Image (spheres, grey):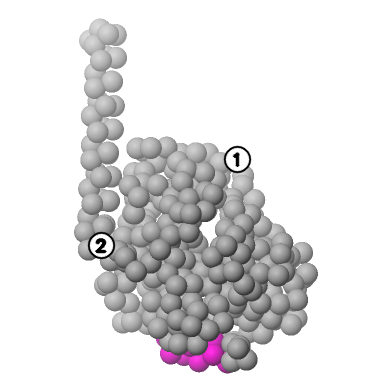
């Protein structure tokens, strides 16, 4: 075979492979959104400088901002089982963070500072007064950063299974940067992202990390998270790339020490690691209160909503 024919054959094979991968990607997005579980016309959008932020406002009373964990498959749906009860005594603002759920997913590097800025701007321009905040997982670090930057915007902070301080101190490495750039590419990166966020992977996360009792995991819950991971035709991969590269992390030791807010940590009792993590937060700031919810892991607000609400009401019972 001549060199010219080899080149033509190579180009043809590459083009065909790219087309097949593109078709597979499109099919995944189509199948993931068939049930349209995250369609919610009652919500609205905050037109932030980096993209539109979806949020839903309900109830009456002292303002309360709910912030879900930071994953490409997470969204405000995380609070569905406690939203109604919280709204009886609070004006509740439930948001989808930039890069997640129904919010925009721009092609940029997602950082701790970006999310801290989003929280600060949202409170100032949408809520309009000092607010209480409940945040899950890594999102708690953004709340702490925002509060450290401006102590006039947040009153009480409730952290649900916050991320390990050591994990939050990790910085991007050369290897991280290579994988981040690869995942950000249009076709191959999208294909890799789809593999890494496949439905079976989300199911495994719920069974091994998120819920204590597998019987409490409903099919609709898994499908909702799967749908969230694939909204936007591949654009969630930009946040995934930043998470994989440790661009969203920040050393919180100094920020945490400087806070004077009331801080309450709720831990799923069946995860020993998270109990140790809460102890680390207390060592840095001894005024932090910690409590556990039995027979739960990372998402007690979904697995044991009433027990979760019992803890929240105790901490917020002095609000006007």
In depth, the one of 142 and 246 nearer the eye is 142
In front of the other: 30 or 153:
153
What is the distance, in whole Å, between disc 2 and disc 1 at their CAs?
39 Å
**Principal secondary structure, stretch drawn in magenta:** helix
| Quadrant including the C terminus | bottom right
Drawn side of residue 223 relative to residue 189, left or right: left
Q: Could you tell whether 5 is left or right of 140 in the image?
A: left
Q: Secondary structure at mark 1?
A: helix
Note whether residue 214 is visible.
Answer: yes
Depth order, front residue of 96/215: 96
Q: Earlier in the sequence, mark 2 or mark 1?
A: 2
**Which residue is depicted at the point 29% across and 14% down?**
7
How many numbered dots are placed on residues in this image? 2
Residue 95: x %, y % from top left = 47, 66
Q: Quadrant of the N terminus?
A: top left
Q: Is 177 one of the magenta-colored residues? A: no
Q: Look at the picture and state if 220 lies above or below 231.
A: below
Closer to us: 178 or 92 = 92
Q: Closer to us: mark 2 or mark 1?
A: 2
Q: Is residue 175 above or below residue 226?
A: above
Q: Residue 135, position in %: x, y?
A: 55, 72
Task: Provide the residue designation for mark 1.
Answer: 174
Residue 160 lies, with reference to residue 19, above or below; the image says: below
Q: Which mark is residue 229?
A: none
Rendered image quadrant of residue 303: bottom left
Disc 2 marks which residue?
Answer: 36
* Residue 264 in which image quadrant: bottom right
In the rendered image, the vertical position of residue 89 relative to residue 283, given as above or below: below
Within 10 Å of disc 1 (Cα), the crowding (few <14, some 14-19, many 20+) is few
Magenta highlight range: 304-314
């Amino acid at each position: 075979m001549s060199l010219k024919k080899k080149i033509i054959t190579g180009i043809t094979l590459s083009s065909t492979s790219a087309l097949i991968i593109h078709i597979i990607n499109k099919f995944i997005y189509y199948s993931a959104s068939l049930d349209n579980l995250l369609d919610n016309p009652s919500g609205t959008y905050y037109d932030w400088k980096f993209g539109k932020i979806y949020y839903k406002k309900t109830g009456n009373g002292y303002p309360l901002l709910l912030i879900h964990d930071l994953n490409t498959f997470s969204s405000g749906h995380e609070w569905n089982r406690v939203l109604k009860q919280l709204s009886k005594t609070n004006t509740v603002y439930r948001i989808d963070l930039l890069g997640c759920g129904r919010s925009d997913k721009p092609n940029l590097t997602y950082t701790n500072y970006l999310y801290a800025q989003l929280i600060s701007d949202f409170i100032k321009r949408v809520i309009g007064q000092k607010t209480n905040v409940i945040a899950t997982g890594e999102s708690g670090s953004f709340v702490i950063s925002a509060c450290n930057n401006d102590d006039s915007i947040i009153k009480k902070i409730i952290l649900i299974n916050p991320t390990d301080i050591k994990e939050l101190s990790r910085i991007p490495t050369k290897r991280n940067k290579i994988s981040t750039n690869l995942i950000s590419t249009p076709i191959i990166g999208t294909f890799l992202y789809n593999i890494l966020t496949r439905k079976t992977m989300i199911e495994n996360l719920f069974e091994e990390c998120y819920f204590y009792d597998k019987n409490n995991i409903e099919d609709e819950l898994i499908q909702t998270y799967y749908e969230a991971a694939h909204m936007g035709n591949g654009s969630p991969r930009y946040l995934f790339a930043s998470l994989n590269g440790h661009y969203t992390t920040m050393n919180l030791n100094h920020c945490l020490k400087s806070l004077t807010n009331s801080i309450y940590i709720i831990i799923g009792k069946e995860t020993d690691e998270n109990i140790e993590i809460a102890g680390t937060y207390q060592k840095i700031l001894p005024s932090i209160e910690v409590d556990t919810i039995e027979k739960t892991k990372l998402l007690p607000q979904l697995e044991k909503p009433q027990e979760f609400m019992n803890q929240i009401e105790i901490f917020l019972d002095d609000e006007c």
